[in-house]
Amino acid sequence: MSEQLTLQVLKTSTDKKYLSKSVNEIVEKKCRLKEGSSIVNPVVILKKLSDSHTRQFNYAYIREWGRYYFVNDIVEMPAEQIQVSLHVDVLNTYKDNIRGITTLIERQENVYSPYFVDEEMLVRTTRFREKKNIGVIGGNVAYYYLTVNNGGV
C-alpha cells in the first residue's frame, strides 16, 4: 500500500453527462492508494463504512488531487476494510475550466443551425414522382425525363 489520501465519501443523483453535480457529503475518511493504481482509475482502501453509508456511496472527491470520481465497485476486505474502485469524473473536475472556454459550437444534440454545414445531420426527404410529357418527336413515341436529387443516393 502507498500514499495516504483524504477521501470525501459523497452521494449524487445527478446524471453522469451533466457538467456540475449536486452532491451530499456522507463522511470524510483517510484512505490509502492501492499500489499500481492510476490517478484516472484509482483503487483506494479505507476502513469499513456503516451499511447505510456504503449503500449511499456512489461518488467521491480526493482532496489531494482535486478530482471527483464515480464509484465503480466496493469490495469488502479483511480487517474491517473496504476496497473502492473509482473512475475520474472529468466534467465535474474541470467544470470551471470548461465554463471559461469561449467557443463557437457548430454541433449540438438538440438544436440545428441552418447556417452551418453539418455532414452528420440526418436530413429527411419526401419522395415524390412527377411524370411530364416533353412532347412527341418523330413518330408517335412520347419521351419523358427523370430528375434525381443527390446523385440518386
Image (cartoon, rainbow, N blue to C red):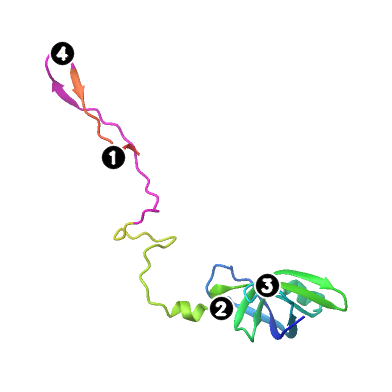
User: Magenta stretch: dominant SS?
Assistant: loop
**Range shown magenta:** 118-141
For the residue carrying disc 3, how many other residues have a C-alpha within 10 Å: few (<14), some (14-19), or many (20+)? many
Amino acid under label 1? Asn
Query: Going 43% across and 60% down the picture, which residue do you hit?
Result: 110
Residue 136 is inside the magenta segment: yes
Where residue 139 sits in the image (x, y, percent)?
13, 13
Residue ID for mark 3 = 86
Q: Are marks 4 and 1 in contact (CB under 8 Å)?
A: no
Write the residue at 65% across / 82% down: 62
Q: Which mark is residue 93?
A: 2
Is residue 28 shown left or right of residue 149?
right
- Sequence order check: which comes first, mark 2 or mark 1? 2
Tell me if residue 25 comes above or below residue 117 in the rendering: below
Q: Are marks 2 and 1 in contact (CB under 8 Å)?
A: no
Q: Residues within 10 Å of mark 4 (few under 14, many from 20)?
A: few
User: Which residue lies under the disc numbered 4?
Assistant: 140
Task: Specify few, some or many for label 1: CA neighbours under 10 Å numbering under 14, 14-19, or 20 or more.
Answer: few
Please name the amino acid that badge 2 sits on. Answer: Thr
Q: Which residue is mark 1?
A: 149
- Name the residue located 70 percent from the left edge and 83 percent from the top edge: 7
Q: Amino acid at mark 4?
A: Asn
Residue 38 image position (x, y, % from top left): 65, 75
Q: Please report whichever mark, 3 or 2, sits nearer to the chain's N-terminal start.
A: 3
